Image (spheres, helix red, strand yellow):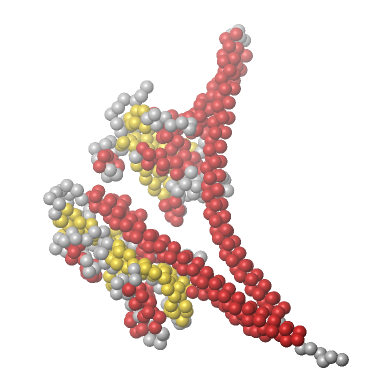
Amino acid sequence: MDKPSNKWLSISLISILCLTIIGIVVTATTYRSTQKHALKMGTDQLIKINDFAINILTLEIESYSLSLEDYASNVFFDNTPLELSKTEQIEKSLSNKSSAIVGLYLLDTQGNLLDGKSFDKHTFEPQTEFPAFLKKDPSFSQALNGQVDQNGSSYFEKEKSYLNLYRVIKNNQNQPIALLVLPLDLEQLYLSTLDADDQFSGYTMIKNQDMKVVMHPSNEQISLSIVEDRQKKYPNLDYTDLERLEKTQLANSDGTMSYHSYWWDKKNPTRVLKLTAYRWITVGKAKWIVATNSDFYEQNGVAIQESLIILGLLCILLATILLLTFSLRSYSRRNQSYLENLRLLERQKLMNERHSLEKSMLQESKLETIGLLTTSIVHDMNNFLTPMIGNLELMIEEHQQNQALIDDLQEVYHAAERGQKLSTNVLRFSKLASNTKETVNITAAVAEAIETMRILIPKKVRLTFQQQATGNSCFEKEELQVILYNLLTNAYQARKANTVINVLVKRADEQESQQFQKHSLAYSTKDFALIQITDNGPGIPKEIEDKIFTPFFTTKTSSGGTGLGLFIVSSIIKKNDWLLSVTSSNAGTSFVIGIPLTDDTPTA
């Protein structure tokens, strides 16, 4: 008998060894490729987030600057007094941008305070002293000389950061005579613009040229340098990578890198690997570096994957071809599932955005369809009533001898006439075509709309109407009627029982006209008609007061509200350059419309 050969055993062992080595090489290569791909995806995402944060920050500061410019342009012109006496203009220009405002100060060219107002609890209050810390701006003296555009450099006071916005006031000879200073609290500016949402685990921070923190989600970090000051506060931490980060960022205008740091908002900071995207920007005299940071492993999703791959390599070294094949297939499935999960998340995000867009488009389409359907139905009803009225007139003439029949016919005739009048008024409200502007008597137009609304609103609603002679103005009469229709509809829908609506139309008195004339220089010599709609409803909640004119915003979701009524009112007001004010409390809500008068004669 021949000796058993080890040939096939040796071949099998060599094959297993070769396949194991090949498996290790293939697996390691795949891991490196996946890690690089994930790192690139994370870096690209951080760059986009950082660019978005930069755009938001610069636009927000420019918005504050434009609000200051708007105020100065409307207050300081020709030989107006150098004082901040127009509180209403301050509120109008700056109240919607008040979250970060510290105050508003007017200085002469020597830096002496001419007038000042501090901002506290959403209100501007007079102040007799100019806060000394505002002079810490390195560009303050240049601003007094008119050499600073928009803003100075950032500075610190009591571990808080500030930025001064400037606007030079010049005389007719184009010489600087005063300086408006609008200081911003950069912490509040950060919270209102760059504070990270729940979907992003990282954060954006801003540092100045000295690498001191200007804005940060943890306010304890404000005014600290990223290495020297932190070493004093946390002496036991390793700052090697932070020193490397500081040198790299000072040497480059933009870039990305990974480094070891800490989550500074934790009670006991632990060392983590972070990924950052940064870029230097210049805003006025301020030069900042904006950096968006995130956890390296959380951002790239490779921490668990790395452990599994190492475990897989150990299994490959100790396993057979079968185990090797199983490990490779298992790894492939996990990698495919990870990528598929990313695709599904992105698809879900796109689907949500698409759903929101389609919902808005559907709402608009429904409104258009309802308008067309209503117009069609009322138009057909009008066509049905016209021959009915004609035949009733003939029957009344033919049966003059039968008084009982004539009385019945006349009752039907008057009912048909009321129906025709109602359909005509509804057609006027739903007319889609744009009419030509004409000179209209405002009192008559309001009275006509009120007469129509008495038919349309529920009988349980008490509608009172006070009218005085006002005058004429040039506009589309139907647009004023649409405004009144929407405001009256909102008023009686706001209260379920004992609803009282008061409508007043009159010529604005002297005090009311002065308020209206401040709206624009073009209105400074105009007289105004005033229309006031007041209800006894529950009022508008404070938290939604700034949203009531937003399209598709409604609190009547259960009753089918469209959220377009007040948006339409606001749009028509802006189109005609009229004035609209709203006051609301628990006792009810009042809308006041101001319409400039003309001397033209009403169109026949």
Q: Is residue 304 visible?
A: no
Which quadrant: the C terminus?
top left
Residue farthest along the front direction in this orientation: 2
Position in image of residue 298 (x %, y %): 52, 73
Residue drawn at x 38%, y 65% is 190
Position in image of residue 571 (x %, y %): 41, 41
Residue farthest along the left direction in this orientation: 173
Quadrant of the rendered image containing residue 154: bottom left
* Vertical order, 349 against 554 (above or below): below
- In depth, the one of 367 and 2 nearer the eye is 2
- In depth, the one of 115 and 190 nearer the eye is 190
Which quadrant: the N terminus?
bottom right
Q: Is residue 479 visible?
A: yes
Residue drawn at x 67%, y 72% is 329
* Vertical order, 36 against 354 (above or below): below
Residue drawn at x 34%, y 62% is 100
- In depth, the one of 521 and 532 nearer the eye is 521
Quadrant of the rendered image containing residue 520: top left
Q: Is residue 305 left or right of residue 246?
A: right
Position in image of residue 511 (x %, y %): 27, 42
- In depth, the one of 178 and 208 nearer the eye is 208
Q: How many marks?
A: 0
Residue farthest along the right direction in this orientation: 1
* Vertical order, 263 against 449 (above or below): below
Quadrant of the rendered image containing residue 516: top left
Position in image of residue 279 (x %, y %): 36, 67
Residue drawn at x 73%, y 86% is 10
